[in-house]
Amino acid sequence: MANFIFLPILALINLLFLLTTVHSNSFETKATQFFNSGHTNNWAVLVCTSRFWFNYRHVANVLSVYRSVKRLGIPDSHIVLMLADDMACNHRNPKPATVFSHKNMELNVYGDDVEVDYRGYEVTVENFLRVLTGRLPPSTPRSKRLLSDDRSNILIYLTGHGGNGFLKFQDSEEISNVELADAFEQMWQKRRYNELLFIIDTCQGASMYERFYSPNIMALASSQVGEDSLSHQPDLAIGVHLMDRYTFYLLEFLEDIHPASQANMNDLFKVCPKSQCVSTPGHRTDLFLRDPRSVLITDFFGSVRKVEITREAVNLTSAAEQPVEATSIRKEPKSEPLSYVDQLPVAEIIHQKPKQKDWHPPDGFILGLWTLILLVFFKTYGIKHLKHIF
Amino acid sequence: WGISRLPALWLKLKRLSLVGRLRRGTEGKWPRLPDSCEEELLIRPLHSGDIYASFQFRTLWDTDFLHQGKKVSHYRLFPKSLGQVLSKFSVRELHISFTQGYWRTMQWGQPIVPSPPGAELWVWFHNTVADVDGNWKELTNVLSGIFCASLNFIDSTNTVQPSASFKPLGLGNATDHRFLRYATLPREIVCTENLTPWKKLLPCGSKAGLAVLMKSEKLFHSSFHSQAVHIRPVCKDWQCSSTAWELRQTLNVVFDLYTSGQGKKEWSLFKMFSRTLTEACPLASSSKVYVDVTDNPELFDLSPATSVLNTAVVLGDRRTYSVYDLTQKETFGQLRSLNLVLRWKGESDMLRPLLHAERYVAGFGLQTGEIHTLIYNNHPYRAFPVLLLDSVPWYLRLYIHTLTVTSKTRENKPSYIHYQPSKDRLRPHLLEMLVQLPPHSVTEVTVQFERALLKWTEYTPDPNHGFYVGSSVISALVPSVVAMDTNNTQERPLFSSFFPTKEESSYFVRVYTEPLLVNLPTPDFSMPYNVICLTCTVVAVGYGSFYNLLTRTFQVEEPSQPLAKRLANVIRRIRGVPLL
């Protein structure tokens, strides 16, 4: 009789112990996760390499990733956006200042707040490699530089037309997978990244990450070697295909991610299986030191900061009164009233002598000089030498 | 950044305006702050049924950027990015504009702020600068980062130094043209990515005041869109003994009757911008909307009506404006929003502008051509001089000996010509002429050119599109019908005080022609690839066969026998009988 009462009590006590240990384990896992990812800032380099109106979908691809990355917290100052052609304000666009990703014009990925750093003819292989390696001319503005350090996680997204081992830039040049691998190695040696996520959406995209050899790079591609990446759906009003399949489903996946999301890279690898994409997306994680299961999506796509919420109030001192410079106190020297310049001073212009930077000898000087030389010569040596000249 | 900081910034704005009001209440006297800003919107219905909206935002700041000793560090209304640019490069005046579309002078009249298609940048440097070209190069790079435009393509091949045009628009008397640089990029595209940083330079951003109307989906769906930044020193007060810095941000847009107006001659703020006005910018000292009602009531009627009228002489014409003051609460009415509606009532005839110009390329083939510039003087009896500035890229080799200027089929000799020939790959042609236009006439300027063949790496990725030649600039003092107001220091609406007026009988105007699109002889870029394929094929077939013939021997091989014979042979071998 007593056993019947004793056993459930024992079971209950055991259960309580188990619960407390499980609870403390979850705290531990949270604590370890807090210190897991070693990055302190996030950067994104998003490149569209195709020109011309029928490559609308490549610009839409990049802009949809730009939109997701901005929504999850990476600011414009940390995004280098390169668009090889302008689709939004293109004269063939029936709705100017918009770039749509879904047909029937459901989602405008261009938006109202977009900053493109490299546009048009500036998107070249040289500029792309210079941005990655940081070897830019000294007068390049900050918004065009990738100012990452050894604790930055960088997301690199490339889209365009590609082939086995190369990616075409603007219909006139190409970047090969060897060049790209070397650029990443330069970045590693200069400590320009902590971890790098490389996504490419082109035909035969997997060939671009075959040659990587630097540590801490994870790569995804939309198709294997020998396969083409296909486009998703055309819009009949705009007249071109709006997005590529892989990025379309990637956008759908990213729309569900919010800054506190715990989705990890394994979910990203499952985006767009062969049934939806027709091509087989591939990925490469052998160079990555951490387990992809423990890498959060927001480690690369978002800019998640570790914040500590404090409940105590802080007293702000009132703003110091700016010493307003009263103009009456300042004793200004009495100067003549200034005036505006005459915009078209006709008389002055007509009498203006053209300013010559180089000094030229007066007219006829060379001719006179030669005449003098000839005269002196014939005076000294006699006129009979004239027949040798003529 | 933007999303999380929005509420904080909004609170800060509200607090500033609150503090301002409190201070006014307690002290009674408004302490004079060194900077102030004003905003205004001018709406002018055009005779073709289109509507022209011109925004101007002005910030005046009494400070000294060019002072060597003390660096300016506290910025309030003036944007810090531009202030740092001015002090670092010792800039005296900066004018930059981005335009999409071409201003049709014949249909729309003269613009308030003229601008050529593409990007245009002209800068006056201070006369203490030692290396103007170095400063210019760095300035263009910095501005390309600020405005998200490809201004870094401005280099010596498209920069010119005009000798008589583009006199400074601000105060000062030194006009040594060695400190002036002018460049245009006619190919530059303008889109939301240029509007976004432009809006961020405004004191109130795009959150309050007139800037809430600037929605890119509506602004770029127009016939003409131009945004500009003009920085110059102006008179600080009416005595004009010292200078203050003025930053003007202007945005001009012309909405088309058929694409934006759906064919109906009825315009409203909501139809144009898909927004209405709800309040003025709290940081602005004046915020006004002017509607040009000179043709009211015969042509259109305006609602909500207002009794405040203002007249101003603009571009040689006295025009009447209805003024809506957004700093007054009554302007917004019961609904707390202002939506101006203009309804057309009848037709009208087109006005003829006194000065306009056209330009086109004549000729055929890809070797030579001719540039024709036509300048029309529509004044019935007055002649006036115009200054024509042409900057042609080096790959169009101009033959200046073929330059002719004819008016009314007679030769018209210019009173001033400044020509600087081009140097291949170094600098463009610069041609400046002062031409007297006879009354009611067409003046034609023609010059022949030859097209150069570029090196194959110099072609753009889409060379079959063509190459652009920047617009010609025509600066003129056009005789005015009405006496112009020469008092530059009194309170005037911003749109009438853009160009300073010195005399009463004429006003200064700048007209831009169309840019030209010229095809250069383009090589076939697939040729190297085709040649390599063909040559390799020929070599492979020819040499390969030859090599095979020389190095391989031929051996006769017995064909394999059928199965029955093979079995029979096996049996015969066993039997010891000769094989088949």
Image: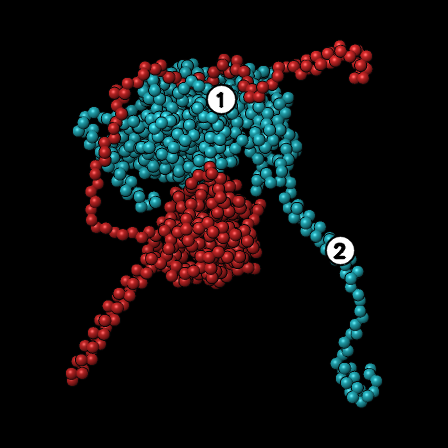
Chain colours: A red, B cyan
The correct choice, above or below, for B26 with respect to A18 in the image is above
> Which residue shows up at 29% across the image and 63% down it?
A28
Query: Can you say which quadrant of the picture contains the N terminus of chain A?
Result: bottom left
| Along the viewing direction, whichever of B44 and B241 lies nearer the viewer | B241
Left or right for B567, reference B35: right
The numbered mark 1 sits on a residue in which chain?
A: B
Q: Which mark is residue B177?
A: 1
Res B289 seen here = no
Q: Which mark is residue B450?
A: none
Residue located beneath label 2 in the image: B543
Mark 1 residue crowding within 10 angstroms, few (<14) / some (14–19) / many (20+): some
Quarter where residue B573 is shown: bottom right
The correct choice, above or below, for A56 with respect to A215 in the image is above
Three-letter amino acid code of the residue under disc 2: Tyr
Left or right for B302, reference A310: right
* Spatial separation of the CA atoms under disc 2 and disc 1: 67 Å
Query: Can you say which quadrant of the picture contains the C terminus of chain A?
Result: top right
